[in-house]
């Protein structure tokens, strides 16, 4: 039997990499004052139908929707924002000090055609700051996502920033865009002709070269922003620049979800091919109302853990070893000493593993390598008698004798 198409088992060492990305993200989220929220893996289907727009591709084609045993329509969460806003309204979190700052690490389910970088189950780390329209919140959210990429060691990531305005700006802009698209009639691909009627902004996502050329002359939303949306975008840009976040303003950036208002952004990583978005987000000032709440603005992002891990591998970013130490014991009589040293190291917070099956030294070094150990501590009879260990750095191969009573501080300093 096999795992379902588009859903994968995550095994070591890939799972180490995922864990590293998740840990780094969550540590940063907490550093910025966000707290964890967990919502159910499935929701009443209305949460997504109303939140993401019933006519959108995600709702009509990509949701895992089923009737439960009492005939209620349920949907496996395709994205994290609508459930979080649903929870904020349900538990009246919007009555407390605002914004409410929440983060999550959660699996998402989308019935998409699987391809490199696109799965039917993927994991997002994300944040939502609900209850404020202040551009400082936008800047904080975007800067936080940038910090995640920097911290996991991804150097080649570009940040695209746009404002899609509020509904008023779009009601002026969209007729202009439709008029432009209709002017090209049959010259556009069938998909773009269909989108012209259904969701004209999405034509900017078209990958057909000829259409892209036509679209390069299309009217841009940024030219149709009302005064307050334009000021908001200006403020966000100024704040990002002042905290050293580099970005490219891309007025053709449209995101795959329909709830966005004003700020929209996406991070794209080099070396990933067509599915190069490693994260994205934006403001959703109308979403709470769609879900039956009051007017509660919000902004957040979701980052794709699998794509970030893939980018780390293709960009050859440095990654931390999965294990601090592997203990290699030489000779039968040292096994007990190795076991007790392992327990002591773990007690000191140094991650550690050792051989349990009496393998020869060479086999133990191989195991250390396979487990991604940063260092090997060798215990032989001589080492035990002389009260010192040999510590080998697994990346440089360098060996250092370390006195037994200095081992913990030596290893701690090296972590
Ligand atoms: P999204 O752009 O649909 O946004 O997804 C966020 C990230 O999840 C993407 O940039 C990508 O890295 C990853 N991702 C999406 N679909 C797949 C897939 N099929 N396979 C692998 N990775 C995938 C959202 O979901 C919004 N809820 C983000 C947000 C939060 N906006 C505001 N707050």
Image (spheres, rainbow, N blue to C red):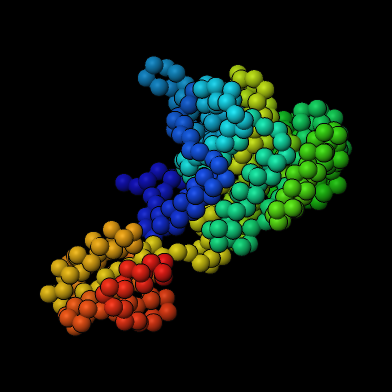
Q: Position of residue 205 (x, y in %)?
A: 70, 44
Give 132 or 257, whichever is nearer the viewer.
132
Give 18 or 352, whichever is nearer the viewer.
352
Side (left or right) of 3 relative to 280:
left
Whether residue 321 is situated above or below residue 330 in the rendered picture: above
Q: Residue at x 25, y 62 (%)?
A: 344
Whether residue 124 is situated above or below residue 259 in the rendered picture: below
Whether residue 149 is situated above or below residue 219 in the rendered picture: below
Q: Residue at x 31, y 72 (%)?
A: 407
For this orientation, the residue located farthest to the front is 405
Side (left or right) of 126 relative to 67:
right
Quadrant occupied by the C terminus? bottom left
In this rendering, the count of numbered labels is: 0
Q: Say whether residue 188 is visible.
A: no
For this orientation, the residue located farthest to the left is 333
Q: Say whether residue 74 is visible.
A: yes
Q: Position of residue 8 (x, y in %)?
A: 41, 48
Side (left or right) of 128 relative to 328:
right
Q: Residue at x 61, y 20 (%)?
A: 293
Q: Position of residue 190 (x, y in %)?
A: 72, 39
Q: Position of residue 274 (x, y in %)?
A: 62, 54
Q: Residue at x 35, y 47 (%)?
A: 2
To which quarter of the image does residue 395 belong?
Answer: bottom left
Give 82 or 398, whichever is nearer the viewer.
398
């Amino acid at each position: 039997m096999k795992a379902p198409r588009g859903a994968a088992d995550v095994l070591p060492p890939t799972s180490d990499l995922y864990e590293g990305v998740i840990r780094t993200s969550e540590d940063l989220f907490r550093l910025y004052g966000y707290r964890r929220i967990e919502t159910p893996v499935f929701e009443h289907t209305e949460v997504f139908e109303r939140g993401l727009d019933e006519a959108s591709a995600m709702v009509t084609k990509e949701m895992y929707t089923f009737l439960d045993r009492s005939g209620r329509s349920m949907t496996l969460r395709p994205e994290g924002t609508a459930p979080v806003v649903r929870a904020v309204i349900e538990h009246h979190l919007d009555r407390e000090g605002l914004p409410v700052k929440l983060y999550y690490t959660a699996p998402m389910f989308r019935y998409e055609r699987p391809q490199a970088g696109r799965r039917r189950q993927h994991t997002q780390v994300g944040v939502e700051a609900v209850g404020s329209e202040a551009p400082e919140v936008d800047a904080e959210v975007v800067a936080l996502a940038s910090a995640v990429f920097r911290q996991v060691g991804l150097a080649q990531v570009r940040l695209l920033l746009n404002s899609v305005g509020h509904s008023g700006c779009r009601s002026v802009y969209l007729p202009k865009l439709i008029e432009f698209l209709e002017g090209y009639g049959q010259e556009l691909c069938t998909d773009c002709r269909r989108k012209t009627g259904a969701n004209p902004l999405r034509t900017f996502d078209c990958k057909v070269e000829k259409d892209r050329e036509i679209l390069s002359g299309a009217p841009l939303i940024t030219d149709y922003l009302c005064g307050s949306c334009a000021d908001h975008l200006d403020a966000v840009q100024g704040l990002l620049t002042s905290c050293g976040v580099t970005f490219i303003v891309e007025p053709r950036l449209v995101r795959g979800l329909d709830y966005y208002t004003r700020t929209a952004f996406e991070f794209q990583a080099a070396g990933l091919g067509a599915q190069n978005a490693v994260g994205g987000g934006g403001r959703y000032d109308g979403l709470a109302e769609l879900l039956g709440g009051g007017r509660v603005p919000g902004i957040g992002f979701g980052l794709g853990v699998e794509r970030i891990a893939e980018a780390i591998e293709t960009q050859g970013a440095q990654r931390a070893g999965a294990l601090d130490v592997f203990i290699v014991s030489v000779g039968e009589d040292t096994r007990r000493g190795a076991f007790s040293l392992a327990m002591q190291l773990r007690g000191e917070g140094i991650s550690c593993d050792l051989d349990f099956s009496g393998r020869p030294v060479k086999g133990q070094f191989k195991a250390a390598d396979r487990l991604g150990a940063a260092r090997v501590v060798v215990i032989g009879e001589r080492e035990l008698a002389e009260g010192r260990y040999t510590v080998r750095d697994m990346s440089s191969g360098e060996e250092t004798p370390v006195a037994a009573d200095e081992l913990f501080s030596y290893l701690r300093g090296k972590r």
